Amino acid sequence: MEFHGWGRYPRIEADAAFPLTPSECAGVVQRADSLIARGLGRSYGDSSLASHLLDTHRLDHFLAFDESTGALTCAAGASLDEILRLCVPRGWFLPVTPGTRFVTLGGAIASDVHGKNHHVDGSFGDHVAGMELLLGNGERVVASRTENPDLFHATCGGMGLTGVILTATLSLRPIRSSDIIETTIKAPDLDAILAAFEENAAAPYSVAWIDCLARGRQLGRSLLMLGEHAGDGPLTVQAAGALPVPFDMPAGLLNHATIRTFNTLYYGKALHARHTRRIAFEPFFYPLDKLAHWNRLYGRPGFVQYQFVLPADAGAAGLRDVLERIAASGRGSFLAVLKVFGKGNANLLSFPRGGFTLALDFKAESAAFQLMDELDKIVLGYGGRLYLAKDARMSEATFKAGYPRWQEFEEVRGRYHAIGKFASIQSRRLGLQ
C-alpha cells in the first residue's frame, strides 16, 4: 500500500499490520525486523513512515474515566475527537490540543504536541500521568514520572522510537462551557505583534496568523487571536462534517499572486483594532478541520510544513531575519502561525522551549527546499530548532545541533530494547540507530 504523512511528501510503499489487541501488537513486533507505529497519519512528514507499519487506530477503546477528577485512561489509538465527544458533555476538556482533533492519543504523546496555551500549560506530555508500552522484546511495561521515568521522558516527544504506546492516562481540564470567548487584535507589524503577545501573556490561549509576504513597514503584520473558556453555557461538540476538497488542485494554484491576495484579504477581514465574540470551541481550536483533505490544495506533489522555535532573547531579531528571507523569496505561506512558548520540559526530544515558534507551509518543490536549507542556518544561528512532527527533510547535522540530548535518548532506547526494532524513515535520515 502507498502511505504518506499529512503533507503527502514523501510517499512510500509499505506493509501495514492492523492489530485489534495488545497481544496482536506484540505478535507484530516480534515478527518484524523493524517497524514504526502509526496512528491517523497526521504527522506531516516521514516520522510515521517505514517499510513495515503497525497501525494503531483500531486500538481505540476507553478503559476508565473518573468524572470527579478528570482522569481518563484509554487505548492509544483513540482520537482526540473521540475523547472530546466523551468528555465535553461531562464538563471536561483536553488540557492541550494541537490544531486538529483527528490525531490519536498515542500520536499526541509521541510528538509531545503543543497548542495555543503552551505559555501557560506546557505540552501534552505534561498532562500524561502514565502509560503502558510494548517494548522491542515483547515485554509490556509501565512508564511514568515515578516508574521507569527515563523511558517516560524519552517516549513523550520520542516519535514512536522507544516502543508502541498501548494505553495512557490523561488528566483533563474542567470547563463550564464548550464556548470560547475570542478576542482578535490587529497588529500592523512585527514589533506590534510581539508587544501584543507580551501585553496579553495572561490569556489562557493565544495564537497569531502572520502575513509572511508583507515587507518594509508592514513586515510581520498579524492578527492575534486570544481565547478563554466561557464561564457558563452549553457543553456540546459539533458534528465532524466538513466541506470536502474532492481532488488534487492544480500544482500552480498556490503561487505568489494567490497567496499575496489571500493574505491581504485575510488581514483586511479584521475591521477593528480589537474585536471580541463568543464562538464554539471547534472554529477556535480546529479551523482547518472544517475543510476535509485540505492538504490536496497543494496538488499531487504535496507540501512541507516548516516549524521552528527561537529562544525568547533572539526571537525578534530571528523572526525578522526569517520573514525578510521568505518575503524576498516570494515563496510565502497562507498558513503561517506564530505562537509563544513557555519553558520547556524534561522530555529528551520535546520541541517547545521558551520563546517564539513559527509554522509555515511550502509546496514540495526544489526552490522551496533550497529556501528551507537557508532558513535552517538562520534558525540554528539563533539557537533554535525544528519540530520533528512536522519535519520531512531536516539534515542529521541540523537535528543533532537542535536536540543536544539525542545521545541520552539513544542510551534510553538501548536500555529498553528499541534499537534495531523501532525505526522510521525520519529516524534513519537523522542518524538515529
Image: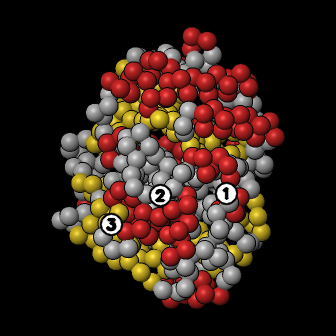
Relative to 427, is 209 on the left or the right? left
- Residue at image x 23%, y 70%? 66
Mark 2 lies on a secondary structure that is: loop
Binning the other alpha carbons within 10 Å of mark 3 as few (below 14), some (14 to 19) or many (20 upward) gives: few
Q: Which residue is mark 1?
A: 430
Residue type beneath disc 2: Leu
Mark 3 lies on a secondary structure that is: loop
- Mark toward the start of the polypeptide (2 vs 3): 3
Residues at badges 1 and 2 in contact (C-beta under 8 Å)?
no
Residue type beneath disc 3: Arg
Residue 166, percent from left and from top:
46, 76
- Mark toward the start of the polypeptide (1 vs 2): 2
Residue 348's label in the rendered image is 2
**Which residue is farthest left?**
68
Q: Which residue is mark 3?
A: 145
| Vertical side of 309 occupied by 153: above or below | below
Relative to 195, is 178 on the left or the right? left
| Vertical side of 238 occupied by 34: above or below | below
Quadrant for the C terminus in the image: bottom right
Binning the other alpha carbons within 10 Å of mark 1 as few (below 14), some (14 to 19) or many (20 upward) gives: some
- Residue at image x 48%, y 86%? 139
- Mark toward the start of the polypeptide (1 vs 3): 3
Residues at badges 2 and 3 in contact (C-beta under 8 Å)?
no
